[in-house]
Amino acid sequence: MPDIKNKVVVVFPAYFAEKTLERTVNEVPRDSVDLMILVDDHSSDGTVQLAQKLGLTVHQHSQNKGYGGNQKTCYKLALEAGASIVVMLHPDYQYDPRIIKYFVELISSGYFDVMLGTRIRSRRESLAGGMPLYKYVSNRALTFFQNLVSGRNLSEWHTGMRAYRREVLENIDFNRFSDDFVFDTQMLFAVIQNGYSIGEISVPVRYFKEASSINFARSLRYGFATIWQAVRFLFNFS
């Protein structure tokens, strides 16, 4: 059972996740997790029905709020549920849920305030795992720039597997951040600005047809938005 001092809540920001949700949920280590919450961003497939069948706590948006907007609801619900550690996991099966137990252990032991699951161990492994070349190159370039600006040495800034100590989510006003994909970048810069510690664990790369992924045009827009957030951080823009 989870440590009695902690309540671990896993949140799934979901959008058309019916094809990958069950595989993701089945690999979550139940002895490390107290509650799983899925927030569906107004999908028209069977995501909600499947989540209910799997025993998840389900919240569905009445209209699409975007990736960042989805996470805002996820964190709000997790905090309301009394979470002391919140794990955010994309339900697209790109990340190995079994690593959650190590996230929980490192945060609950006081080593880190935030944990990231990084997919980048080597170029060969990332590409062999199915990551498109343009995504690998852009991930490396953006991460290099973000590390340069922030003074950190994170191996990946763009992961969809993260864990937060409750205090982090309570003290960062994440509701003011974007409702789009750049939300993740804004969160990490805010974590650094507030002096919280960040740890990383490598996860296998899983890219495949059913996994959700933004297209090239959205990726390009995300890249420019990420650079702008880094500039804002560098010059301490509010």
Image (tube, rainbow, N blue to C red):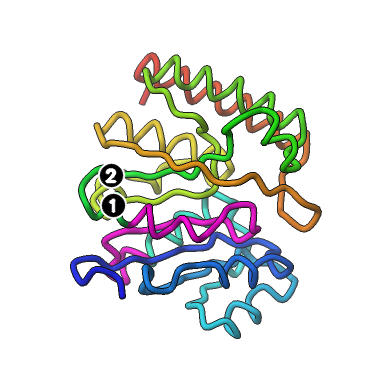
Give the structural element (helix, strand or loop) at label 1.
Answer: strand
Picture residue at 60% right of the left edge, 65% below the top: 24
Left/right placement of residue 234 relative to residue 123 reads left
- Where does residue 186 sit, x and y in percent of width and height? 44, 35
Choose between 33 and 76: the one closer to the eye: 33
Q: From this view, report whether residue 217 is shown above or below residue 171.
A: above
Residue for badge 1: 165
* Highlighted range, magenta: 78-104
> Picture quarter containing residue 49?
bottom right
Mark 1 and mark 2: Cα distance apart in space: 5 Å
The local crowd at label 1, few if under 14, some if 14 to 19, many if 20 or more residues have their Cα within 10 Å, is many
Give the structural element (helix, strand or loop) at label 2.
Answer: loop
Disc 1 + disc 2, Cβ < 8 Å: yes
Choose between 155 and 90: the one closer to the eye: 155
- Where does residue 66 sit, x and y in percent of width and height? 60, 52
The stretch drawn in magenta includes residue 147: no
Q: Which dot marks residue 113? A: 2
Picture residue at 28% right of the left edge, 52% below the top: 165
